[in-house]
Amino acid sequence: MSAAAEVQRPPARLGNAFDDDLYGKSLDTRQILRLLKWMRPYRWQALAALVFVLTSAVCAVLAPTVLSRVLVDEIALKSHGPGLADLGQRTLNGWIAAQLGVAPLYAACVLYLIWILLRAGFTCAFGIALSRVVLNTLRDLRSDLFAHLERLPSSFYDRVAVGRVMTRIANDVETLFELFAGFGQLFGQFVPFFVAISIMLTLSPWLTLELLPILPVAGLFTWIFRRMSRPLYRIVRQSVSRLNENLQENLSGIEIVQLYGRERENYARYSAINRDNMTSLSRAFTIESFYGPLINSLSFIGLCIIVWGGGRLVLHSQITIGSLLLFTQFLDMLFQPIVAMGEQWNVVFRAMASGERILQALDWKAALHEPEHPLPLPDQLSGGVEFRHLTFGYSKDYPILRDVSFTIAPGERIAIVGPTGSGKSSLVRLLCRFYDVAPGQIFLDGVDIMDVRPADIRTRIGVVLQDFHIFSGSVYDNISLGNPSISREAAQRAARLVHADSFIRQLPQGYDTPLNERGRNLSHGQRQLLAFARVLAMNPEVLVLDEATASIDTETELVIQDALRTLTDGRTSIIIAHRLQTIKDAHRVIVLSDGSVREMGTHAELLARGGIYRTLHELQYQKVGEA
Amino acid sequence: MATMTKDGDRVSAADARIVPPPPLPQSRPGTRPLWRLFPLINEHPWMFWGGMALTCLGRGLEAGIPLFVRLGVNRIAAHNTALFGPIMGILGLVLARYVTVAFGRKYVRDVGVLVGSRIRERLYWHLEQQGPKFFTRFATGDLMARAINDLNLVRQLVSMGTRTVIVLGFSGFVAFLFMLALSAKLTLWLLPVMPFIAVGGFILSSHIFRQSLRVQEGFSTLSEMVQENLNGIRTIQTHAQEDREIARFAALSSGYADDYFRMTLLNTGLNAWMMALTGIATVIIMGYGGWSVLHGAMSVGTFTAFVLYLALIVAPLQQSGQMVSLFQRGASAAARLFEVLDYEPEIRDTPDAAPLEEVSGAITIQHLTYHYPRRTSGRDQRLSRATTVMAPEDGDGHAALTNVSLAIRPGEMIAILGRVGAGKSTLLRMMVRLLDPPPGTVYLDGRDIRLLPLEQVRSQIAFVPQDPILFADELGHNIAYDNPRRAMAEIRSVVEAADLEDTINSFPDGIRTLVGERGVTLSGGQKQRTSLARGLIRDTPVLLLDDCFSSVDTETEENILGRLKTLRGGRTTVLVSHRVSTARHADRILVLDEGRIREFGTHDELMAHNGTYAMFARVQGRRSEDDMARGVSFPGAGT
């Protein structure tokens, strides 16, 4: 099925928002620069980290210098060749020996120890500063990304799998940590690299020149191996994200999977992707296994060159044995950055892909129009609503609403009825500004809602959604939704109104009972009552119920209706329902069918007219009335 | 009547060929998570031990290199120009080392990949078997975090960690031996440093373990919050709660960064400690070696070789900090994975489960009593988040169902009515063992449902839940979800039965229309009907419909119910509804109240009984009747 699905898949409607190729193809410096913006507040800490790493690099170079130049050359071999680069270590050593009154040998040991301990200290300080900077940066980036995604119009999520978005905030940001930390490490290794090369050049330009050709060779090998492994890693990344999507969907629909006996089939599909992943990963690792030791071998070849070329220079007294030893010690510093770069390469590309996905998520603009100069809504809404020539569809070729116009007087109770898919919920979503209203207009108290900030509208209009969500947290949290202005008393009052109070009190901890993800420990009807209570607790000026009582029994519904009658007295309310007894209380009924208003009028008028409404009505009546 | 043999098309031939992943090897209870990985690694003994042996051999060859360097340096010091020998020696060793090390690494890494993907597949299968208790304890975001991050850490541990520890340990040991051979005294001088290294590693490692557990838990919490927020985005935005949620996330994200920082502090500290000790070891060699050279007890060449060996010993020491943290992170990841993997699925086949030859669809329930969940404390007390969760286990909470007994005859259509929370869904869910009923309470064709293979229960009883969850796939694939190889004609016929034809025809891609991401947005009623079609297509002896018409308008519902009766002729159907007009279609009607059977009988009987059902009917019917009368006799009234 998946193969067929691939072929059939229409071009993504979000443009390239979900490019499947977003798996790190190239190094984009602009992207890195853009990500670095989040580091700006911590630039001084970053600078401190830089100072620490430089200091530690200097210490890293000085320690072997003490060993080779002072200990071996001066103390052991007693060669006091002039002009030998020792970075002042011999002088320093002499001074220490004089101060401590010990033999130069022990002074050299002390000096060496000082450098090593300083190096350890500064490396540690660097690690701490670096991780603080990176963690702070990523913390901010993650929070900003979350804020951005949280504020995206919910219509955006109509078509975007939550799993995909989730991994961007969670895993992609995590990968960036590796990138930043890796760059820090790399930096920490490049500094000694240059210091070592410059010292080597002063010691013996000739020997250094003999050694240097190894570096481009190492670079070449790195390049070749990376070219070989890069497509493999791309496959690995793709398969990993497919694995995650599959798992995520399987988990959210686990009951359906089990009920419909799809465990084996789904497992087989997952396993097939896993095999892809395994094969490519194994191939990439094989390349990796041949690459790493090769670079190491090159450093041993460097050792040969030093012994061979350097040995002759020593024989000709052009350099000292100490210098030779120093060369061998610096060899590591020369190769370390290349080895590290080879190791980081994969991380860098993975992180580039992650960075790209994060930036892309930050750039997602599901264009929900925000007015430039938002108009305020009146302090007290009278609640008049007008829909004017409203046409709307989730995609262009499939309109849901066609030229809908009607007016709701302030304080009026309106019922909207119609067959499934007739556009009732869309009407409500437009009123709450989940989508842009165009073509057509909606007026609230005479103000075009496109001129008002969406959030302003939503705080004034209370909607019981058809697809409401219960969060993990206590019952009380789910009614107040964390809004501190809703007291426990207010929450309980709202719960009593919708007849939820009695079942809540029967829960083990009453209003403090923790609910699971999606409220799995409540029945569907109970969840719906909570969602209802949550809206009533807001005490909204306009009340919209989108099938708010669909899963609620007649008895409870009767109680709620009585409560609603008083509650909606003088308060504009729009009620979408299928059950006619719910509708009966409305001042007027609007019948929607195929996205157009077909009938409009009072309950009695519509019955008398003998149209769609009457047919719907008779169906329910007949069946029950026959008794 | 469907039989198990006829049922062959559900567990299709292709399905049967799919072999579930074998369980992971068992360890004695109480074995530490890290050691539990060992039997997994040992499933590939040749690759792993061969790889290890090769890498060790490579390290042995590497340890020979300084010997030739010593030879060379001594010759240089003695003004001997015969350097060709030592150079060729070095080159030969380098080549041999390269081949052995490369192959060794490859094999060990492959073991890591194999172990990782073995755990991954088993984890997936394991998750598919879990029931409500499990998913109450582990949220989706948490499970995702474990399956992604923790699995990666474990793979890294096997690929790199085991190799590193053995190889570095080995090369340290080999270098030590070579040094011992060169100068025993000098080597012994190094011994006092060793305990400090061990102690530092030991003390910090348990801290690192705990801290990395905290970090990984923190990551889970982040994932959970993002997952929940995005799923409920519409609700959050409707209530204009975005800012509060953003602040909550920022706090969580901060806490995570701080935890992570503390872990880095530990790692960095350990590294610095090792670096300092390494320096001290070097100083000892310098002092003693320098003294020996000065007193002519050691050649400059030997000293040089010593310094080179030191690098061999020192490198493992310096990296031991990183190794400890790699191991501890891997260990905590393994602990988190095993926590999930050890969770026995609560609903399983009993050992003596045997399938029924033929299922006629008679359901008998005897004295079924089931209690609402009692409070159980959840996982990790380490994190200061709300840890108490509800677990649906038999507890001392109040009863969801009390002493329910009823007999549903094969082919009957039963409607269940009752108030919110009356136990309607619970009863239905027990019939398909989404919740396990107590033993000896629910029977299918006279056999305790708990003694039937789960596979048969689920294949003979189709359940359409309240929440119409669809997958991001084509409509047709969603409908034929139980068996992707169903014929188009079958799909067409249930599409018709669920009154979806017009809806589907209005889509440009028809039955191949994608739903969800990159597809169309279905209305609540359309989703419910698709979900219904998915249940109908299975054509099972028993069909359970859990209030799955709530968002469907009456007219459509009437159409569907009419077709359902013919379609289901002779087979059992149980449906939950709130509408009397729906219940009217049923042969018998059951009214549940607070978990007890209030009324049970035909429509006429219940109407005559004049109880709750009659009241429902009056409320739903009278109003219509009244209005009808008013509407007809006073046209235009109420204007």
Image (cartoon, grey):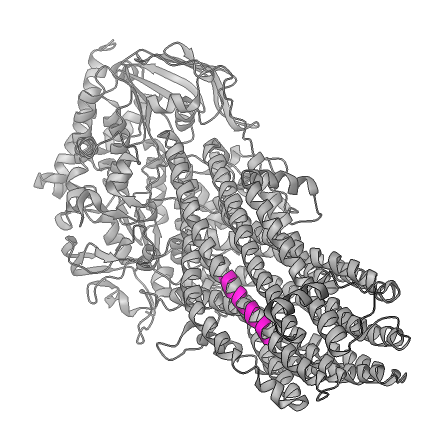
Q: Residue at x 63, y 43 (%)?
A: A19
Vertical relation: B476 (above or below) B182: above
**Residue B394 lies in what quarter of the image?**
bottom left
Where does the image place residue A276, in percent across and percent down from the top left?
62, 62
* B445 relative to A303 in the view: left or right: left
Residue B247 quadrant = top left
Residue B274 in the image, given as x and y percentages of width and height: 54, 69
Query: Does the stretch in magenta take in A450?
Result: no
Q: How many marks?
A: 0
The reply to whether residue B533 is visible in this rendering is no
Estimate the x, y position of residue A371 in percent, counting from the top left.
Answer: 50, 18
- Of residues B292 and A363, the one drawn nearer to the viewer in this rendering: B292
Is residue B277 on the magenta stretch? Answer: yes
Figure quadrant of the C terminus of chain A: top left
Q: Is residue B326 left or right of residue B444?
A: right
Question: What predominant SS class does the magenta segment belong to?
Answer: helix
> Foreground residue, A535 or A625?
A535
Q: Which residue is located at x 54 percent, y 55 percent?
A: A125
Say whether residue A240 is left or right of residue B480.
right
Range drawn in magenta: B267-281
Q: What is the x, y in percent for residue A326?
A: 75, 70
